[in-house]
Image (spheres, helix red, strand yellow):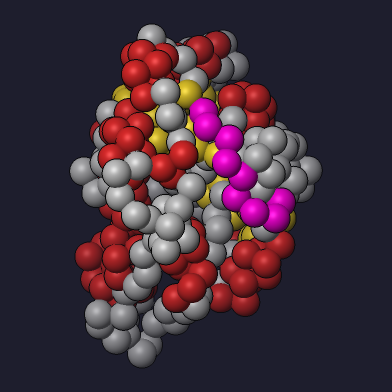
Amino acid sequence: MNISDLTDEKWFQALSGEIQLPEIEIPKMPSEQIQLNFTGASGKDTLEAAYGFYILIKDILKELNIPINPQTKLLDFGSGWGRIIRFWIKDIKEENLFGVDPLPEMITLCKQIMPRINFIQVNPEPPIKEIEDDTFNIVTAYSVFSHLNEEYTNNWFAEFNRVLKPGGLLVITTRSKIFIDYCNQLRKEDVQSQEYKKTLPFCFNDYHQCIKNYNSGMFVHQSTGGGGLLSSDFFGESCIPKQYFERFNGNFKMHKFIDYLFFEPTQTCAVLIKNDSLGVT
């Protein structure tokens, strides 16, 4: 059996360990603790959101009549332990898949698990020195701009404009407005024993002002830090509304904005297309 012959659902089942495909090399999962530290979930539960994002992107590509094939070049920005990028092995040659992350331990782990994919350690700020201009057809970033502050977000959007081909697709998620409500609700609960949630009750304390700012199109950010390289100078919790993404219209055209994802309501999704050299897509 060839991996490309699998349905998307069968591939998800293979990645999550529900079915065994001895003739196909399946990327291993990292330790349960690493999974929990990143998403608060592990095993099939943590892969379900990644699968939802993968299917969402494939549906968007169909809407736009953009083909995906083994020669497609894709960058997974903030690849972490490879939760998202592993899904694309079925569709794209591994030599054309790139994952970048600032955490050296995650790059080392991913190179061990998926040695034929290009994993690159980057600084928290651009550029990605190893990547040439106009390289990628697709750039994805799941729950990365849920954390970067406004300055870093703007800097990375300029870098995406550099590395994407004209007409290339940028699909990113950030925190949804629902997340502000979620943090407000957590203030009424005891979550200090849950590593993934313990800083969230301290976010967006001025609830009504944060909602007002979001509704008016402002970038809403709460600095928290994420440990190690993820300094509170730039890392925290971020909610970015549609109106803010429209500021990038000089370089990108907004294809759609999804207020919340059905598989993860605390995430919203912006889908943008890089303008061609004439500013027209």
* Left or right position of 261 against 71: left
The quarter of the rendered structure image containing the C terminus is: top left
The quarter of the rendered structure image containing the N terminus is: bottom left
Q: Whole-percent x and y of residue 173?
A: 41, 38
Q: Nearer the viewer, residue 279 or 43?
A: 43
Q: Residue at x 41, y 61 (%)?
A: 194
Quadrant of res 127: top right
Magenta stretch bounds: 221-229
Q: How many marks?
A: 0
Q: Residue at x 57, y 41 (%)?
A: 224
Q: Residue at x 43, y 29 (%)?
A: 205
Q: Whole-percent x and y of residue 192?
A: 43, 57
- Name the residue at the bottom extreme: 22
Q: Is residue 161 magenta?
A: no
Q: Is residue 255 above or below residue 227?
A: above
Q: Residue at x 67, y 67 (%)?
A: 105
Q: Is residue 226 magenta?
A: yes
Q: Whole-percent x and y of residue 2?
A: 35, 76
Residue 5 shows up from this direction? no
Which secondary structure dominates the residues rendered in magenta?
loop
Q: Whole-percent x and y of residue 209?
A: 40, 16
* Left or right position of 158 against 246: right
* Left or right position of 276 against 187: right
Quadrant of res 91: bottom left
Quadrant of res 271: top left
Q: Nearer the viewer, residue 270 or 151?
A: 151
Residue 104 shows up from this direction? yes
- Name the residue at the right extreme: 129
Q: Is residue 122 above or below residue 184?
A: below
